[in-house]
Amino acid sequence: MSLRRARSAEEYAEWVKQAMFEVGDLKDCLLYEIEDLQRFPGYIEPLEEGVKQVYDAMVAGTYSFGRDDLAFMEVLRRHEDQIPFHTLLKQINETHRKGLEVRDKD
């Protein structure tokens, strides 16, 4: 299955903003559901930090596309079944690695 890449810088930025929201929401839900914080999933903080790095670079104007996976992909691969928005994160990474999906206008 081929992942869809963002078609514009605006769409890509929206995806990253959405990922920031989703990570925060997942963290809030887990905090609400887990009474014993010692059992809090260890993948949340690295995932949150990885998405935040991309977001902060975009805000600062220092973001650039690259060939390597984004920092959060290692966490995603290990805990994909526990992350409901894993496809969004994969699409962000795919766009990062391959650039925007530009269609030829005939």
Image (cartoon, rainbow, N blue to C red):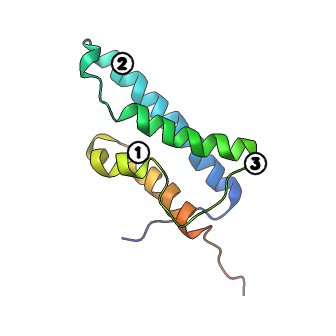
Residue 85 shows which numbered tag? 1
In the rendered image, residue 95, in percent from the top left (x then y), is placed at 55, 63
Q: What residue type is labelled 1?
A: Phe
Query: How far is mark 1 from mark 3, CA to CA?
Result: 26 Å
Write down the residue under mark 3. 61
| Sequence-first tag of 1 and 3 | 3
Number of numbered discs overlaid on the protein picture = 3
* Residue lying at the far top of the rendered structure: 35
Write down the residue under mark 2. 31
User: In terms of depth relative to the viewer, which is nearer, 96 or 30?
Assistant: 96
Tell me, yes or no, whether the two marked residues, 1 and 3, touch with CB atoms within 8 Å: no
Q: Quadrant of the C terminus?
A: bottom right
* Residue lying at the far right of the rendered structure: 61
The structure residue drawn at horizontal position 26% and vertical position 46%, both measured from the top left corner, is: 81
* 35 horizontally vs 59: left or right: left
The structure residue drawn at horizontal position 52% and vertical position 42%, both measured from the top left corner, is: 51
Tell me, yes or no, whether the two marked residues, 2 and 1, touch with CB atoms within 8 Å: no
